[in-house]
Every structure is written in C-alpha cells, then in structure tokens.
Amino acid sequence: MTVVALRGFALDLAAPLSTAAGDIENRTGVLVRVDLDGTTGIGEATPLPAWTESATECRAALRRARDEGIPPGAETPAARHAVTLAYRDAFARRAGRSVAASLAQDTAPASVPANATVGDGSVDETVASAATAVETGYRTVKLKVGTRSIDEDLRRVRAVADAVDEPRSGDEAVSLRVDANGAWDHGTAREAVAAFDGLVEYVEQPLPADDLAGHAALRGVGAPIAVDESLARYGIGEVVSADAADAVVLKPMALGGPSRALAAGCAAAHVGIDPVVTTTVDAAVARTAAVHVAAALPGGGERAHGLATGGLLADDIVATDPVPVENGRIGVPAGPGLAGDAFGGVV
C-alpha cells in the first residue's frame, strides 16, 4: 500500500459548537489517497486536539507516510485513521463489498439509527429543539447538561420527557441521553446520576476523562454511565478493567481508525457494555466511515449512534452527503468501498 496523494481542506461550522475543550468554529483536515495494487482508496484525517494530535502533528505524520513510507502510529490517531481508512476503502473496493460488510465479515444492516443532539438552552428552547427532532423521525435525543445547576438540568430533561412521552401511532418510544462533558465533581455527579435515574438511557461523561475510578463508583447509583473522553484517553482495556462504564462512545478518529474503533466496540459488547459510534464533527469521508463502523458492530442496526453531525457544517467536501439522516436513520452505503463513486476526484 502506498500513500499517493494528500489534499488539505478547511470547513466552517454553521454555528460554533461548545465542547469540554472549548468552542469549535471550523474543522481543518487532510484527505488521503492510497494505492493498493492498482486499487485506490480514500481516507480522512480531521484532528481535534484534546481527542487527537494537533493539526501540525497530523500533517507531519501524513507527509512521512507519503514521502518515506512510514505509517502513522498510535501517537497520531487522526493521521492513522486517514491511512487505515483509505486502506479499508481500497480493500473493500477490490473485493466488491461495502466497508461495513468488509469490517463485519458478514452482511451489515441497511441502515443505522441516529440520535439528535440538543444544546444547553432554556427549558422552552430545549423542549422545542427536542420536539422538532422527534417530529422529523429521531427516536433518541441527547441533551447537553452540566453548565447549569442540577435542578435546572433536571427541569429541562423532565420537560422534554413529558413533551415526547406520547409516541405517534406506530412509532417506538423516544429515549433520552444526557452528556455532561466531564463538568461535575464527585458529589455533583452522584446527585445528578441519581436524579436522572429512570429518565435517561445513560449519563455520558459525568466526571473528567482521567477519573475512571470515579466513574466506576457512580455505576449502580442511578442512571447508567457512559464514557467518551475517558475511552480515548485510556482505551477499552482499562475502561473494562476499571468497571467504569455501562456504555462507551467510540470516535474512530480519536481511536486511530475504523478497525480499532470496531475492535473496541466488539470488546465492549462482549462484556455487556453498549458501544455507540459518533464522530469528531468530521467531513463526509470520515462521517461515512463512522456509519460503516456502526453498522459492523453487534446490534449496530438497533442502537442509536451519534452520527447526525453533517448538518453542523456550513459546507462539506462533496456537494451531496452520502449518509444523510432520513426519518432518524442513516442508510449504509452499499459500496463498493465507502460510498461507490461518491468521493471520486476529491483527492
């Protein structure tokens, strides 16, 4: 396999996105093309510091891969994601299969459910956003919490639960998730997890990323616990050993590629931890790859994943999104490769 071309890109977000590491206003990255014995494949590196290496480190690793044939290592997960994804795309193309089928070594579901994400607004704003998401077909809604008092967040979540409590005829019930982005201390997290019991599917990252023991201590207190930043920091082995989670959030870009994300998700599922795939607000290539990873997981076609992030971008690297959300679900491109010819000529 040879890296034959690199192309940088920069994309603005439609509106700034608040995260635990600060506001995100744009996404910059590199598209990668590889040659596998005459079959080409495409990958994407869109680094996000605090989850991955810096943009400078990423570009340097990709130039070494192109110029010196040195593959990116674990210390540059976004660069590694790009190269290994490009290889996966080429491998699947050569086999005439989709990336999902290639990863799963079996048939993959035709679509995967996605969760809608609602920001940290007032009660009325939160209810309105959640209701709009449900009306457009989402059956899982994730609410941002942690910047307000627990009482305020509880009012917001209860108001949404009341607003979406009655499913339309033929629809499944709506599930809620909350994400604190590591905002709480031990006492506050314990109070919150107990308060959200019975209201939400899980509480995501209630404590800072480095506190595996604290997350383990929260399990059984109330609502189930999911970890996101902690998984990227420690890896699935340490999360499982610490007994720190009921669910894990898998970001292929932060974990070093689709194969590593799938392996972590399968390891989690094997011990009864639910794997959920999401993105780092990536461009279309990596977002499409994340859909394939979700589809390849055990039960991937049944569990809602955080893949509805294309709408956060003001523009993208292709005019037509290969993985749009329709009625709360995302179709898995049938291939070959990532999305047939959808990315032809972009790099």
Image: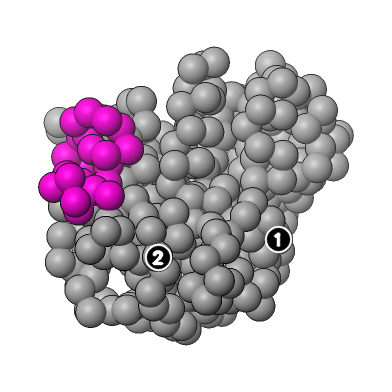
Front residue (pair 283, 95): 95
The three-letter code of the residue at mark 1 reads Ala
Is residue 266 depicted above or below 340 in this figure? above
Residue 50's disc number: 1
Magenta stretch?
91-113
Q: Does the rendering let one see residue 242?
A: yes
Front residue (pair 180, 71): 71
Horizontal arrangement in the rendering, residue 172 relative to residue 34 (left or right) = left
* Secondary structure under the numbered disc 2 in the rendered image: strand
Which of pointers 1 and 2 indicates the residue nearer the eye?
2
Q: Position of residue 74 (x, y in %)?
A: 64, 51
Compare marks 1 and 2 and give the one earlier in the sequence.
Answer: 2
Q: Residue at x 32, y 38 (%)?
A: 103
Q: Position of residue 72 (x, y in %)?
A: 58, 60
Residue 2's disc number: 2
Front residue (pair 99, 18): 99
Q: Position of residue 276 (x, y in %)?
A: 46, 38
Q: Position of residue 305 (x, y in %)?
A: 40, 43
Decide whether residue 106 is among the magenta residues: yes
